[in-house]
Amino acid sequence: MNNGLFKACSLTALTGLCLNVFSQTDERPNIIVILADDLGYSDMGCYGGEIQTPNLDRLASDGLRFSRFYNAGRSCPTRASLLTGLYQHQAGIGRMTFNENLPGYKGTLTHNSVTIAEVLKDAGYQTGMIGKWHVAETPLKKDQREWLAHQVYHEDFADKKNYPVNRGFQDFYGIIYGVANYFDPFSLVNGETPIKNVPENYYITQAFSDSAVSYVNRYAGSDRPFFMYLSYTAPHWPLHALPEDIEKYRDTYMDGWDAIRERRYLRMKELGIFPFAYDCLSPRQFTDKWTENSDREWDARAMAVHAAMVDRMDRGIGELLEALEKNGRLDNTLILFLSDNGCSNEDCQNYSEGENDRPDMTRMGEKIVYPRKKQVLPGSELTYASVGAKWANVANTPFRFWKAKSYEGGICTPMIAYWSKGLKYKKGGMTEQQGHVMDIMATCLDLAKVNYPKTYNGNEMIPLEGKSLAPVLTEGKRKGHEYLGFEHFGEKALIAKDGWKIVQAGEGSPWELYNLNEDRTELRNVASENPKIVDKLVKKYNEWAERRLVVPAPK
């Protein structure tokens, strides 16, 4: 796909294109936050994966990778926390984007929180967002099925006051909902305007990358720095990819779950992702054998499509880097790349089609197949499928579990920080300094030399929870969080700065205890041997939960 195809659906994003190199006089860095969706911990080459990600690998080789960086376990809570510098409940999205009429569960960003874009725009930054928003309440319509298929028209996908352009972003091209058909996406808007039609051969990942390039070309014509939030949908289900990208990985996964997982872990050890003296690869969570799997062809294809989606995203990031270089902006641009949660174990083909954000037909009325019996290979617009738990266990190597769980496989994300001019510590290396997505807001404010506001638009702000990562980038360490708390639908955890972690796998389950300094993949529950540590951390968790507006999970 070329930029010509993109022009038809995003004219505003491409206007004012300018290549006025070296015109920026404000020395504060540009900041780009790139968020992948459901990317596994070991999917990228620079974290051990076999997927070809040369551009992300380039950022890693000249940047700094984090091995202990955390998210909020799921898409919308993570995005709320990232954008506001708060825990997700404080920002109003403790669960999903539906209003439960509780302070921490409004289903949309509250106005007692302020976004990175709002603060940086007031501080003189140009601000633009591309991609998935997913932090606004999205009430369902009576004709939701037809709306999903573009067969009826509604002006608003959510209350427009909660659109990105009304939360600090001067420019926005992307989707308001959380799930999209990659070839003909629902809830696609430019600014506030719904995009009714997309060009032939449209593919959303490429369109997002093209838009990011156009933003950089335009922003580079100003003497002011810019903040860009590039929020890809890839590789979230449905498994949709371009045929040529799928072909590239046609035979890659035919050796099956165990072989790919073992190879990934060996590469991780070579790369020093986990520099422990002991073996920390968790046992595979499933006992069935690939050789006895009657769905080998379908399963290998599913992971090939997942890889193709990541590959296309990486190529788009390469185009963005090229635009930054051509405009003389790369050296003084901080780029942060991470995932919103671990790879998903969901079998979306078993969901009810035609509901919420899952269409059952195309714009032309063609039936979309949800291959519950794996009767149709995934990849095209006419299928809705996902990789499932067995491949998620591989994608999250070496951890156990996946998205929406509070074990490391759900909440620990790969994270790359690249900043040629400002990064002073261990370029090309790893850090075990602990961080959280809410720290991104604090980092942006630190580098932009602005303070977090006590009030904004007449509303009193909840105090900032995040802490700047800048000392890690310049000196290799910082005074981090005493504790990090996690909760999502009753999945709970608390991590102390000394490495102790408690986990509760669902409301009412016993608390488990792990020492992450000695047991990074949570294989040895030592709660019974250390009751005093458990009691102390449970008390701290309860204090954390009360302050952060957490309520018990629904029965």
Image: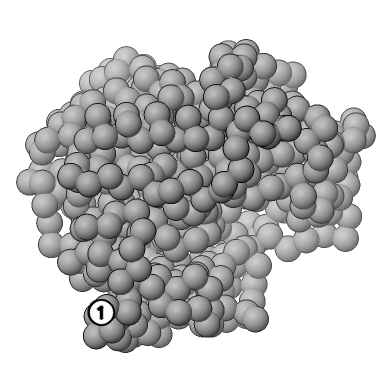
In this view, the residue in front, 227 or 282, is 282
Q: Nearer the viewer, residue 43 or 515?
A: 515
- Residue 1, compared with residue 140, is above or below; it is above
Return the x and y of residue 151 as percentages of the image width and height: 88, 41
View extreme (left): residue: 475
> Farthest residue in the right direction?
365
Q: Decide if residue 232 is on the left or right side of residue 409.
A: right
Q: Residue at x 41, y 33 (%)?
A: 262
Q: Residue at x 62, y 63 (%)?
A: 97
x then y, percent, for residue 280: 30, 47
Q: Is residue 151 left or right of residue 458?
A: right
* Residue 464 appears in view: no
Which quarter shows the C terminus?
Answer: bottom right
Amino acid type for the residue under numbered disc 1: Asn
Residue 84, x across and y down, in percent? 39, 61
Identified at 30% across, 66% down, the residue is: 514
Q: Which residue bears the numbered disc 1?
A: 530
